[in-house]
Amino acid sequence: MTDLEAALRRAVRGEVGFDTTSRALTTMDASNYRRVPLGVVAPRDADDVAAVLEVCREHAVPVVARGGGTSIAGQATGTGVVLDFTRHMNRLVGIDPEARTAVVQPGVVLDRLQDAAAPHGLRFGPDPSTHSRCTLGGMIGNNSCGSHSVAWGTTADSVRELSVLTARGRRLRLGREWSGAPEGLRGLVDGELARLRTGFPDLPRRISGYALDALLPERGADVARSFCGSEGTLGVLTEAVVRLVESPRARALAVLGYADEAGAAEAAAGLLPLGPLTVEGMAVDLVPSTRGLPRGGAWLFVETGGDTEAEARARAEAVVRAADVVDALVVTDPGGQRTLWRIREDASGTATRMPDGSEAWPGWEDCAVPPVRLGGYLRDFRRLLTAHGLRGTPYGHFGDGCIHVRIDFDLLSADGVARFRRFSQELADVVVAHGGSLSGEHGDGQARAELLPRMYGAETVALFERAKAVWDPDDLLNPGMLVRPAPLDANLRFSVLPREPVDVEFGYPSDGGDFSAAVRRCVGVAKCRTTSVSGAGVMCPSFRATGEEAHSTRGRARLLHEMLAGELVTDGWRSTEVRDALDLCLSCKGCRSDCPVEVDMATYKAEFLHHHYAGRRRPAAHYAMGWLPVWLRWAARTRTAPVVNALASVRPLAAVAKRLGGIAREREVPRLAGETFSRWWRRRGGRPTEGGDLVVLWPDTFTEHLSPSVGRAAVRVLEAAGLRVALPPTLRGRAVVGDGTSRSPLALLTARRGQVCCGLTYVSTGQLDRARAVMRRTLDLMAPVLETSAPVVVLEPSCAAALRTDLPELLHDDPRAARLAARVLTFAEALERHAPDWAPPEVNLPAVGQTHCHQHAVLGDAADRRLRESAGLTGELSGGCCGLAGNFGFEAGHYEVSAACAEDQLLPAVREAPDGAVVLADGFSCRTQLEQLAGVRGRHLAEVLAERLD
């Protein structure tokens, strides 16, 4: 391997990665399979690709071309050298609106092409659900389709010319009439014309095998079309000329409700004569909530187009009239359509979990049959599932007869893997009996190639092998795919994971307490690799800032998987590779909500840091900022906040303190409040007013010591709404709820003083033993509150999220933790639930800012939206993460990424704000980031409302 790496470094101008991290990131795609490559190369251009092929040919090392790594059949994994085109060969070379063509490099992401074509009224026809991260090279390799294939066909239908390098270094320009055909291909076809005319099923979604029938003379001898779907086994794509189609000016979406899945499937083919753009289907067992959908147990999503909204709507209404439905809904609003389509697009991840939370896997993800036979095929499919004791949730492209499904295979035990093989063989026979294709979109890869003889027969499969030999006589390119494949039950990625549960700190309630199962959640659909967020989305800010796989949620999950496997990452919890990948994780928790399978990297990071630093010296920032509540309480008790502020304003002293504390030199140290929130509360009287419901206002560390104005404003608003406000007890023992001090003589004699804390700073730095001790002390203090029915109102979103999730998951053995978590409300939730008749003061101004990432991921912001609307605060808050994220943005080495995250959504939104707009930022980190990077003062919603009370 050393000789190979050295030769590649001499020959290639792009990056060559033979390190553990580079290899670990590409061991898997979105399939069930895993292969460990020797190294990864990110070529800069076609010359680099040629150099890689020459070196690998000399060393007899296979080459695997990889796109976005979202393949579901295993074809984007390999044991040789992996080519990563996403880093450099990712350009959109140009668009010709007159010719309706575009020239692209293989690593360009589909959405980038769509964005560039849209101003010309054009688009690329195929659009898989992974459109925000899949690449054109991967789409050509798989002959991808997507939801609009009933109108615009597959990728092969959209390809004009392909620039390809063969394994032996020949540069070909593939096109029609044998253009670019390698020597021997035409002779091979001429000798097999009868087989090519009769041996291939005629259906819209036949992706399996090589498309050799595209080389028939009556089909234009289209070498480029024949190359599509070859899964990188024939040549390496370096550039493509693709066809664009006219995009309808207006669209409407008809959602048709049916009693069941079979009814929807049987209706789909009958809608095709109406010329729809999509006919997508899904059943109720795939939908977390049917809110917004018409009545029914299954639905068809039928999109129509037109030059005007009225024309598109008329066509959608014609579809409804022609369909025999239980109920129907027609939507023309683009936002409403996006919301509905998101349900369908997230299905590829949602389907990896059964309704009861158990795991489900690909492998039979996308079989296709003639659309008129779809209903019968689905019934036979369901019967086969029942016969094998399996469960699955079909959905997909009903108009094309293509079904996606994840099945709850047991791929961990020998018996389960054996059943996986038997089921696969029997299902292949069912598909063939219905005149179908084993793959209708995602290719054969390792998952289905072994079964191609059942579909095509041994003679046609032998013809595939001969075609492979013409293109790649040395079997250098992606060997083991399509021809001479590995068994479908070999190289399973689960086989390397530990069989016994790993000893961990968090409870992982959704994964049965099994950390391996938690890591297995990431199936590789790579929604975390999107380069822009939509709406209030957050995930994954560090990937958007760096563009590096290692700093995506998927990349980190892959490294954790390899850590547990112990084959590539060999030092377990002490792994520096995993530590470095997690270092730029902001712990924003965006993946917990935005990832279709709810990977929770913030929790995994805290878990890893706990074990990684166990018994070892930690980074200085863990002591400086992890123990922030201690230092701030010390300053408050000694009344030295003015001294600390004065010293921090002296630049040389501040520089020394920041260096010793592991704090970024670019950061200003926030000023401590002269009077803490609790001290103001006691000076005010420390007692709840008379009135309505009692609410306990949580004095979080940030409100208490750094921004007590937020707490004072919240008290004013809550009391104006008729609520009785109290602070938590500060003495353990015979404390009294509602005074915030528990100063009765008996309490003072029998209890110890303390202050509640959610433990967030300890959790985020992985100091879980300390976090657990702080949380137990907090539960002791809150015992009197838990004996009442009073809610706990938390103003800081990150602290509220910690109490809702980290507390019960870390103290999973203490029932009080779940009870306290259930009491936690945000400021807006408290007003909505406990003062429903109160009308907030009218602000009547536009609002900008950002929904706190933890609020988006854990708490939700529906109540906040309603409160803002009631107060006349108009406009939408942006998504993403502010980038400061508690301690993250303050840590040395994080400043650039932190600032880049702020520039992604927050700062542009504030710069573009209309005059007089209110800048809302409920989180202290968000307000600090705004002040330090933009010189803008953000305010908590409570402050805005309190100001208007006057």
Image: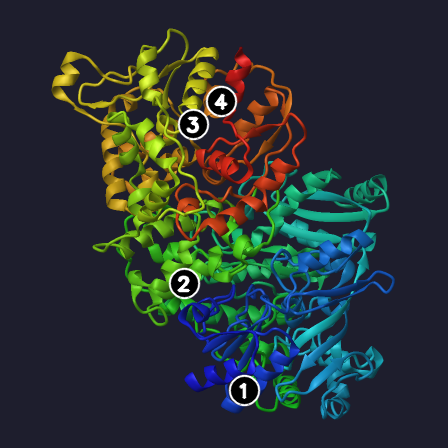
Q: Who is closer to the viewer here, 649 or 361?
A: 649
Question: Label 4 near label 1: C-beta < 8 Å?
Answer: no
User: Which residue, given by chain and number where applicable, does mark 2 sit on?
Assistant: 559
Q: Who is closer to the viewer here, 748 or 351?
A: 748
Amino acid type shown at disc 4: Ala
Helix, strand or loop under label 4: helix
Looking at the picture, does residue 943 appear above or below residue 1? Answer: above
Residue 540 visible to an observer of this rendering: no
Q: Who is closer to the viewer here, 947 or 650?
A: 650
Q: Residue 759 appears in which quarter of the rendering?
A: top left
Identify the mark at residue 942; answer none if there is no mark.
4
Cα distance, mark 3 to mark 4? 9 Å
Q: Residue 181 appears in which quarter of the rendering?
A: bottom right
Question: Label 2 near label 4: C-beta < 8 Å?
Answer: no
User: Which residue, given by chain and number where applicable, does mark 1 sit on?
Assistant: 55
Looking at the picture, does residue 764 appear above or below residue 544? Answer: above
Identify the mark at residue 167; answer none if there is no mark.
none
